[in-house]
Amino acid sequence: GDSVTQTEGQVTVSESKSLIINCTYSTTSIAYPNLFWYVRYPGEGLQLLLKVITAGQKGSSRGFEATYNKETTSFHLQKASVQESDSAVYYCALGSTGGNNKLTFGQGTVLSVIP
Amino acid sequence: GGIITQTPKFLIGQEGQKLTLKCQQNFNHDTMYWYRQDSGKGLRLIYYSITENDLQKGDLSEGYDASREKKSSFSLTVTSAQKNEMAVFLCASSMRGAEQFFGPGTRLTVL
């Protein structure tokens, strides 16, 4: 089956510093999966941050970037300079390519940005 | 734009009780999903439905039933609530192959 691993359960970063949240995936599918980052801001519902459906491509949104690396099966989330408003829970997810778009989620990383 | 509504927001039940959670979407999306999230863990797929009256089991379907009688609604039943069970149930919907949109969740507590 599919699985997604986020190694950090909690990350604390000072404002204006850089950020990386690690995500690696495993799949038994022959086809390359779609990869997503979802985010839940305090008091809000889960929403899509960015997605990449082609291996080797980079997705970006709100200053965050993630590159789909099929060699290392990774999809790390990065930001050059975080803001306090980025404090949230971030989930990496793998989407099946069979049309039903089933998602397999990592366990989530809680990001706290210190002013 | 559209919205996904989940009712109730909080659900408290007794051990062994059958409990039903409801989800409505007005996106006119074909596919709907139910996920369970336990504290500190990722979301796990319980059931999904690609069209009205269709049901597909996810990784966590045991102990649950689902129903998709209309395109816009998808309900989930906990067939026998387990004591001390606590989790958040999230409903989502999508067009075929597109991104999923999530509802606000139902928080379940079993006494």
Image (tube, coloured by chain):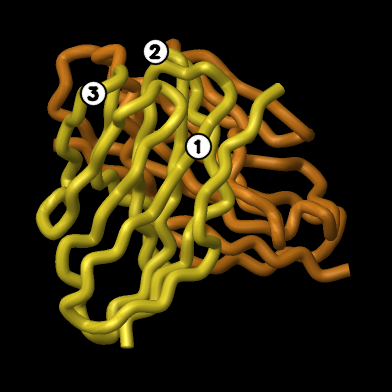
Chain colours: A orange, B yellow
> Along the line of sight, which residue is nearer the eye, B45 or A5?
B45
Describe residue B47's horizontal placement relative to residue B21 as left or right: left
Q: Earlier in the sequence, mark 2 or mark 3?
A: 3
Q: Are marks 2 and 1 on the same chain?
A: yes
> Along the line of sight, which residue is nearer the eye, B49 or A94?
B49
Residue B99 visible (yes or no): yes
Q: Are marks 3 and 1 on the same chain?
A: yes
Q: What is the quadrant of residue B31 in the picture?
A: top left
Q: What residue is pinned by disc 2?
A: B96
> Along the line of sight, which residue is nearer the eye, B9 or B43?
B9
Q: CA distance from mark 2 to mark 1?
A: 18 Å
The reply to whether dot 2 and dot 3 touch (C-beta < 8 Å) is no
Q: Is residue A47 above or below residue A29?
A: below
Q: Who's the residue at 40% across and 21% down the image?
A: B71
Q: Is residue A56 above or below residue A10?
A: above
Classify 10 Å Cα crowding around label 1: few (below 14), some (14-19), many (20 and above). Answer: many
Numbered mark located on residue A59 in the image: none
Q: What residue is pinned by disc 3?
A: B53
Describe residue A103's horizontal placement relative to residue A13 as left or right: left
Q: What residue is pinned by disc 1?
A: B24
Residue B91: image location, x then y, percent: 44, 43
> Along the line of sight, which residue is nearer the eye, B25 or A83?
B25
